[in-house]
Amino acid sequence: MFCPKCGSILMPKKVGSKTVMACSCGYKSGDTELKLGEKVEKSKEVEVIESEREHLPKITADCPKCGFNEAYFWEVQTRAADEPATKFMKCVKCKHIWRDYL
């Protein structure tokens, strides 16, 4: 929750017997009482959406597993900065991943 006056985050503050959300600028949310220690139930349903579309550039390379000649690629600096990056490739057809040390 954020302060409608200044935009800062509201913090719980004890005012008498009530606990309200208050800001350092002086704003207090007096319309609702905050109950600390309430448990919020989480939804146990999780929807997993697996994207079939890769957002990586493609290159012509022979897959060592299935022999298909097209692969996605990306580079990662896995060794020291003065050494070349490691190129990873992923087969478009069988999704096999292999490394190409430059």
Image (spheres, rainbow, N blue to C red):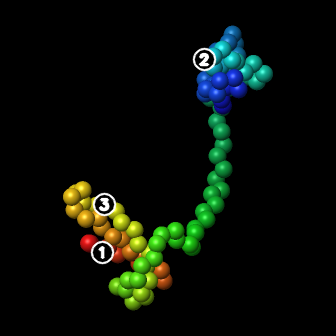
Can you say whether 3 is above or below 100 in the image?
A: above
- Residue at the spot x=32%, y=73% of the render? 99
Vertical side of 23 occupied by 87: above or below: below
Callout 1, which amino acid?
Asp
Determine which residue is flagged by label 2. 24
- At mark 3, the secondary structure is loop
Residue 62 visible in the snapshot: yes
Quadrant for the N terminus in the image: top right
Q: In the structure shown, which secondary structural element does the residue marked by tag 1 occupy?
A: strand
At 61% from the left edge and 23% from the top edge, which residue is drawn?
11
In this picture, residue 64 sits left or right of residue 55 = left
**Pointer 3: residues within 10 angstroms few (<14), some, or many (20+)?**
few
| Residue type highlighted by circle 2 | Ser
Q: Residues within 10 Å of mark 1 (few under 14, many from 20)?
A: few
- Residue 17: quarter of image: top right
Q: Is residue 58 above or below residue 40?
A: below
Q: Mark 3 or mark 1: which comes first in sequence?
A: 3
Q: Would you identify the image quadrant in which residue 71 lies? A: bottom left
Image coordinates of residue 92 in percent, x first then y, are 47, 80
Instruction: Residue under label 1, please give it.
Output: 100
Disc 3/disc 1 C-alpha distance (Å): 12 Å
Instruction: Tell me which numbered mark, 1 or 2, is placed earlier along the sequence.
Output: 2
Point out residue 22 in the picture as x, y percentages from the top left corner: 65, 19
**What is the total number of numbered labels drawn onto the structure image?**
3
Q: For this rendering, which residue is in front, 74 or 99?
A: 74
Q: Which residue appears farthest toward the bottom when viewing the image?
A: 67
Q: Nearer the viewer, residue 91 or 57?
A: 57
**Disc 3 designates what residue?**
77
- Judging depth in this view, the residue of 70 and 20 nearest the camera is 70
Mark 3 is on which residue type? Answer: Gln
